[in-house]
């Protein structure tokens, strides 16, 4: 769609159309265009994203406010400052770690000279080392902690030292109370097939439901609800029916009619008879007195064999032929005016055992007609027709192929 769509001025001097076009141009400039010099302070900001399409913005000033863009050079300066700050922080951390390690080594040496470290001193050293390790970003880690004569050793290069402790072992604790059993529970006795499940549990798993005694006779479910979507094999129509609140909603869900008439019928009826409306309200029905025909009921375009029926006012379909094909499925009376040499064909002939008939009304036929090869005539010769007049020709077929022609009338006037 164009950004500015102007009205066409087809001819003449149309002041209204010209003014309307100028107004559209003015509105577009005022409302949709950014101005380099915005002297009157009118709104001059973007209302949608600005796509540079791979182009650059140049000559940007150094950022001052938080919402201003950084230039590439500004990012380089910031990266250098951050690197210097990180190096200073790492150096300070290493110095602090070295100082803590020196103090810890001096304490360990003093403890060795004294001979031994008490339990409280050993655990204090452990806590101190853990605190140092945490404060120095895990550069100092706790290694092995064993029992024996108290000692503290530090291994590894600066920056990744490991502190190892030996803590004196305390006296043995009191004996716990004796268990209620009288002996050990051996797997060879209680799990004879070594499958990780005791024999009694396996017997319980194999017990038939009828062999369990003391079970309740019924298991009434707790009151609860499920959404219709919880029915795994449901359809959208079925769920809509389940959640419908009235009959109109159900009819809408299944695509049925939405009429609101109440149909009322008689107290009794005759089997296999048609229903007829009683009155014009659309709500009352009654017996029609007409029985349903025996056998299949066909529609207006279906074929049905009638036996013992009376057909009245039978009407035929007339076809005015444009081409030269006589289509027996289109009708049974055909008319055509002949203006030169004409070769007829016949299509959709009924199958053998079914009789088909037709009448052809020809104008000015004369000797210009060539009939289908499977045609038969009285005496074996096609008749000479009227050159300037109307002739009526009849035909019947019963074997699905042989066309039996005969003259109904020549030069009919």
Image (tube, helix red, strand yellow):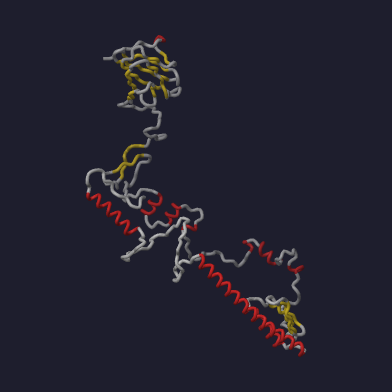
Query: In front: 91, or 258?
Result: 91
Q: Is residue 193 above or below residue 173?
A: above
Q: Which residue is at a point 30% across and 26% down the rendered structure image?
A: 313
Q: Residue at the location (34% across, 50% down)?
A: 258
Q: Is residue 296 left or right of residue 127?
A: left
Residue in the foreground of this view, choosing between 333 and 172: 172
Q: Position of residue 254 (x, y in %)?
A: 41, 50
Looking at the rendered image, the quarter that the C terminus falls into is: top left
Q: Residue furthest front?
A: 59
Which is nearer the eye, 276 or 143? 143
Q: Position of residue 314 (x, y in %)?
A: 32, 26
Vertical comparison of 73 with 149: above or below: above
- Percent x, y of residue 122: 71, 85
Extreme bottom residue here?
Answer: 114
Q: Can you see residue 134?
A: no
Query: Relative to 391, does residue 129 appear above or below in the rendering?
Result: below
Residue 173's quadrant in the figure? bottom right
Give how far across and how far down residue 335 sits, in percent: 32, 21
Q: Is residue 324 above or below residue 191?
A: above
Instruction: Give the residue drawn at x 42%, y 57%.
Output: 243
Residue 104 falls in image quadrant: bottom right
Q: Nearer the viewer, residue 219 or 55?
A: 55
Q: Residue at x 25, y 49 (%)?
A: 17
Number of numbered callouts drawn: 0
Q: Is residue 38 visible?
A: yes
Whether residue 109 sits left or right of residue 222 in the image: it is: right
């Amino acid at each position: 769609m164009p950004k500015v769509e102007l009205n066409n001025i087809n001819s003449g001097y149309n002041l209204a159309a010209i003014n309307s076009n100028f107004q559209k141009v003015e509105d577009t400039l005022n409302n949709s265009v950014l101005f380099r010099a915005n002297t009157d302070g009118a709104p001059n900001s973007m209302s949608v994203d600005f796509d540079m399409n791979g182009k650059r913005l140049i000559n940007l000033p150094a950022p001052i406010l938080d919402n201003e863009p950084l230039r590439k050079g500004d990012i380089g300066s910031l990266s250098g400052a951050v690197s210097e700050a990180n190096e200073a922080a790492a150096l300070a951390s290493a110095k602090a770690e070295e100082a803590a390690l020196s103090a810890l080594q001096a304490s360990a040496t003093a403890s060795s000279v004294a001979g031994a470290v008490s339990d409280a001193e050993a655990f204090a050293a452990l806590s101190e080392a853990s605190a140092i390790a945490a404060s120095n970003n895990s550069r100092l880690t706790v290694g092995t902690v064993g029992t024996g004569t108290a000692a503290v050793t530090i291994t590894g290069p600066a920056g990744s030292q490991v502190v190892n402790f030996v803590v004196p072992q305390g006296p043995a604790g009191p004996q716990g109370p004796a268990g209620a059993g009288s002996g050990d529970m051996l797997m060879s006795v209680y799990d004879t097939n070594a499958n990780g499940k005791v024999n009694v549990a396996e017997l319980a798993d194999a017990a038939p439901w009828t062999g369990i005694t003391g079970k309740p006779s019924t298991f009434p479910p707790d009151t609860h609800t499920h959404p219709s979507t919880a029915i795994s094999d449901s359809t959208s129509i079925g769920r809509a029916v389940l959640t419908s609140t009235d009959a109109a909603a159900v009819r809408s869900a299944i695509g049925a009619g939405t009429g609101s008439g109440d149909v009322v019928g008689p107290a009794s009826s005759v089997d296999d008879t048609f229903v007829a409306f009683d009155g014009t309200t659309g709500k009352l029905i009654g017996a029609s007195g007409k029985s349903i025909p025996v056998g299949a009921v066909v529609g207006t375009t279906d074929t049905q064999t009638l036996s013992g029926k009376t057909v009245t006012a039978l009407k035929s379909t007339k076809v005015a032929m444009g081409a030269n094909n006589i289509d027996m499925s289109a009708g049974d009376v055909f008319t055509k005016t002949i203006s030169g040499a004409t070769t007829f064909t016949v299509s959709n002939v009924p199958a053998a055992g079914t009789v088909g008939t037709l009448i052809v009304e020809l104008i000015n036929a004369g000797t210009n007609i060539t009939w289908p090869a499977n045609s038969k005539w009285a005496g074996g010769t096609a008749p000479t027709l009227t050159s300037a007049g109307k002739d009526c020709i009849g035909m019947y077929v019963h074997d699905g192929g042989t066309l039996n022609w005969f003259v109904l009338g020549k030069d009919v006037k």
